[in-house]
Image (cartoon, coloured by chain):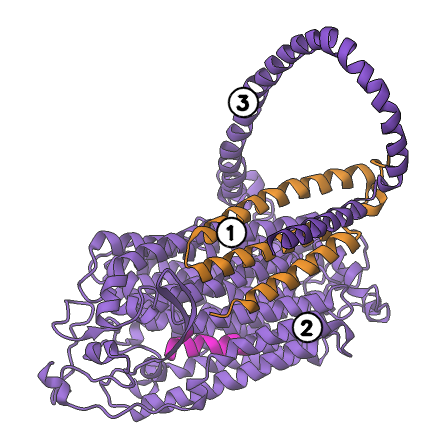
Amino acid sequence: MLINQFLLLGAVLFCIGVYGVIARRNAVMVLMSIELILNSVNINLLAFALRNGSVDGHIFALYIIAVAAAEVGVGLALVLLVYRNRRSIAVDELSEMKG
Amino acid sequence: MVAASEVAAEALKSGWFLENAWIIPIIPAVAFALIIFFGKRMPMKGSEFGVLSMLASLVLAAGAGYQWIQRVNAAGEEQYIDPVIRSWTWWDSGGFSFTIGQHIDGLSLTVLVVVAFISSLVQIYSLEYLRGDRRYTHFFAALTLFSAGMMNMVIADNMIQLILGWEIMGLCSFMLIGHWWEDGANSRAALKAFFTTRTGDIGLLVGTSILFFSANSWTQEHLGVSGFSIRGLSAWALSGNPSSTAITMGAVALFVACIGKSGQFPLHTWLPDAMAGPTPVSSLLHSSTMVVAGVFLVARIYPVFFEGMNVYGTSMNMITLIGGITIVIAAALAFVQNDIKKVLAYSTVSQLGYMMMGLGAGAWLPAVFHIFTHAFFKACLFLGAGSVSHSGSHHSFDMKKDMGGLRKYMPITFATWVISTLALCGVFPLSGFFSKDEIIDNVGYAGYNAFMIVGLVGAFMTAAYMTRATYLTFFGTPRGAAAGEHHDDGHDAHGHDDDHDEHGHDEHDSHDAHASHGPHESNALITVPLIILATLAIGAGLLNAVPFGERWENMKKWVEPRGVVVGDADHAAAGHSKYVVPVAALQAEGHYDSPCGKETPEAGVCYAPQLKHAPFKWSKAALSMAIVFAGIILSWLVSVQLYTKKAGALVGLTKRNKLLAGGYAFLVNKYYLDALYEKVIVHGIAHPIARGAYWINQNIIDGIVNAFGIVTRKVAGWVYRNVDQRVVDGAVNGSGAVARGTGGALRPVQSGKVNQYGALLFAAAAVAGLVLIIINT
């Protein structure tokens, strides 16, 4: 089986995700971009799992999906709190951590 | 092989439209993508994609329907009409291949044509109804995807594909009901619809799993298809192979899903709230698509329910019981509604009860025919209600406050409404008569006598509450907005009306001008769909006009799967079952008596049980007609006294009489089911969990943290005195200077901008990746 297409798809998704994390102002968009990155990783894991004929990659991907769900839950809760406090979820306005 | 199979059956006719029916749901799915990506740039804001895709689907569905009729007509009298099945591998997993494909037979084509037809009309109607809406493009996108989901479910050849369509519909109904989500009530209604149907969907997954694990080995061995396949499940259910526990559990679990989706008691509570969506959505969801899905599922794998519920062996089973309860309680609720759309919503719930009751009592064909006819007149009624609110009552749906006397101003809407109302009541010779009366008749014929009475009571109530709604809307004296009053805050009873004003017309001020010159008829984009639907509400019944003799029973011939033993088991296992061979030869004299559904076929398989049909009697029809007219006349008299003459004996009776007041409060509060679900069940489950979590948090986790803190402080004190002060400080003071230097240099990096941190993170990761690659090569 040709694994290139899968890896290519993973890479493209990863790049879209990275672009989103860096360039997007909307915090929800950033969270969604992180999802994209995680899923590109999943695709890679599955592609290699299929090539090697082992089931480890599948299981790992399932774990990632579960953890990603939790991550989004926490992330959205953060966004919600930020929104309540500032009436805005633009991440570039959140510069309290400026050193 | 069986001797009789030597009677070679000729190949069934097929055609391009039948073989390629799988394209039908693909078209709207593609149109959905086009609307999402290019809709906003198009001259008609994307609605052209939606309307065109629906019309294209309609053409394909109609072509397939025509070819199916030819196929049936060309086949022998007692020949089994093989559905046109095609399937492709969807995905492979663990050596098992999940398929996707089409299962085209009379049932799926009937529903397919209805869905495509109603969707087309609803989209055309929405062009006018939602003109200038803020999310016009997204509305059409969701509407189109919704139809795609329904069509996908209808043509599904296996349960997994069916679930896919089912869930697409669930999602789109959420989007459409909450279309005007700025209003909290609307988004709550959307959530309620979604969660309530999800509750039922648990049953769908459980039931599908149960059936798969019970049926898979049998279907693989005998038919070469998986245990998800609809054809396989049908044959398996009638094969005598399934254990009665497994098939009963599977049927019950699947029926729970149908209860949720089709708004049956006790999960019907979402359906009236779903009226918060725009009227075209209500019309589409509650006439032909969403709510019919549950009924369709029962009809689709009917053998499973037939065996699991022992349809011909009892005088009461779960399906008839739920259906019967639904008919009566929903009809009773329709009496206390002031919102015209809610009356129609409860009417839908009640009619779905009829369909379910019919299916539960073996009246498969009348139930499916009722899906067909009900779609037309109920869509017409909903669109008529929309027309009234759009042009007659200034976007209010409140019959008591803002309507009355509209028949003079809106003659077309009025005429179509009355025709559809009579069809819904089942007045001869409109379409509702031929389906509803058949259900009631067949339910009694199959031995479910109690439920026949329930059906007649339901028919009486239907006639009465529809007369009440018609009277309040179109007769009597005009009130509120219908009398030309312009009020800004008058109709708060229905949350989204004001919203609609706001969103619907902020770009179209001229359009809103009609409020100033009172009610008037809607324009052609609204009335033409109404007229088409009303025409069908009159004529659709003739497709299966049982009273006129067997020659008129076309639906029975074209749609009902024939309960014939089929000997294609071995052919199919070899992978090519283009046509099938009836095992028993046509008996020369008398009616062919099929064992399907009664006993285990000795050789070959059955795909459908042999169903009974009640012989038509004019006396029974006259009885139900009399009941319907009694309902209409009684309700008319009471309405005139109550709403126009304000007769002292009747007005306020529900307040004066304790018993009636109690009953009224019981109905207005919808049997307190909402309160039960939200206060008792949701709180009962969610609150203890929350309290338990809080207790654990306060006592256990905090305790650990506190203990850890105390220990840490003690250790830290010792370390501070001995290590820190003496050893470290010296070093630190030296390094402090260094750190301050580097800190100053690195300070610009700490910009506080999260994106920048992200960029740094990825840059670092990239560098690390490069290093890894270099090291490894």
Q: On the image, which quarter does residue B642 sit in?
A: bottom right
| Chain of the residue under label 2 | B
Q: Give the chain coloured purple.
A: B
Give the colour chain A carries in the figure: orange
User: Percent from the top left, x then y, of residue B54?
Assistant: 59, 79
Q: Which residues are magenta?
A: B101-117
**Residue corresponding to mark 1:** A61
Cα gap from disc 1 to disc 2, whole angstroms = 33 Å
Residue at screen point 34% across, 86% down: B552
User: Percent from the top left, x then y, of residue B179?
Assistant: 67, 59
Q: Secondary structure at mark 1?
A: helix
Q: Is residue B225 within the magenta segment?
A: no
Regarding residue B316, the answer to whether it shows in the image is: no
Evaluate whether label 1 is on the same chain as label 2: no
**Residue corresponding to mark 2:** B35
Q: Secondary structure at mark 3?
A: helix
User: Percent from the top left, x then y, of residue B365?
Assistant: 34, 73
| Chain of the residue under label 1 | A
Earlier along the polypeptide chain: callout 2 or callout 3?
A: 2
**Residue corresponding to mark 3:** B696
Answer few, some or many: residues within 10 Å of disc 1's Cα (few below 14, many 20 plus, some between 14 and 19).
Answer: many
> Does residue B332 appear to the left or right of B502 in the view shown?
left
Q: Is residue B102 within the magenta segment?
A: yes
Q: On the image, which quarter does residue B586 sit in?
A: bottom left
Residue at screen point 72% across, 74% down: B38
| Chain of the residue under label 3 | B
